[in-house]
Amino acid sequence: MAVAHLAHSWRVDSPPETVFAHLTEPQHYIGLSPLVAEVRDVRRGTDEQGAPVTDYVAVERFRFLKVLHWDNLIRVRMRVVEPGTALRQSVVSPGGVRLEWTVRLTPDGDGSTVDDQMEITMAAPMRGFVTGQARGVQLHRATELTRRMARHG
């Protein structure tokens, strides 16, 4: 098995509590990730320690040659690490791909700094494809979250 670590930090024009509220809603990942086309089976609850968790299925849509597509159903568990400032999503994808994604929000003037870190475990032959896709999603998420959190007027 291969392991990859990806990190990216950027600033958005909304306070941590606003960004956190947005990121804790599974439906908001449609478009926040360019691959997520649908979110299903959202279940909210608590883990063994009583911390809030949200389980859901995200449908990643991969397109090939602009005509063919493949829907990859991934199971996601979102956990609050620090209320209002940090959350972690654990992703189980077919093909043995596992991803731990952690986002931490820090006040930055009238906005926030977003620290986005991923640890991905996959079969070694898949490393290039999986890390390339994950990095593309990470950078798209930064651009789209910045757009969504922009203050208007």
Image (cartoon, helix red, strand yellow):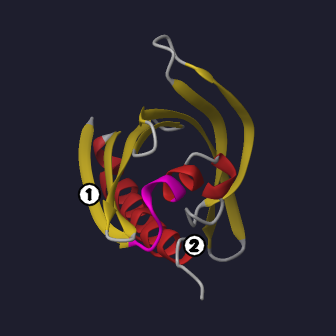
Residue 15 on the magenta span: yes
* Along the viewing direction, whichever of 106 and 48 lies nearer the viewer: 106
Q: Is residue 63 left or right of residue 12?
A: right
* Along the viewing direction, whichever of 136 and 31 lies nearer the viewer: 31
Point 59% across, 84% down: residue? 152
Residue on which the image places disc 1 = 7
* Along the viewing direction, whichever of 24 and 125 lies nearer the viewer: 24
Q: Which mark is residue 130?
A: none
Q: Is residue 7 left or right of residue 60?
A: left
Identify the magenta region: 12-18
* Along the viewing direction, whichever of 126 and 137 lies nearer the viewer: 137
Point out residue 2 in the picture as x, y percentages from the top left corner.
Answer: 25, 41
Q: Amino acid at mark 2?
A: Arg
Q: Secondary structure at mark 2?
A: helix
Residue on which the image places disc 2 = 148
Residue 89 on the magenta span: no
Point 54% across, 52% down: residue? 23
Q: Is residue 23 above or below residue 48?
A: below
Q: Where, by quadrant of the figure, is residue 74 drawn?
A: top right
Which numbered mark, 1 or 2, is in the foreground of this view? Answer: 2
Q: Amino acid at mark 1?
A: Ala
Point out residue 117 in the picture as x, y percentages from the top left corner.
Answer: 31, 51
Label 1 crowd (10 A; few <14 / some 14-19 / many >=20): some
Point 49% across, 11% down: residue? 48
Point 64% across, 48% down: residue? 25
CA distance for labels 1 and 2 = 21 Å
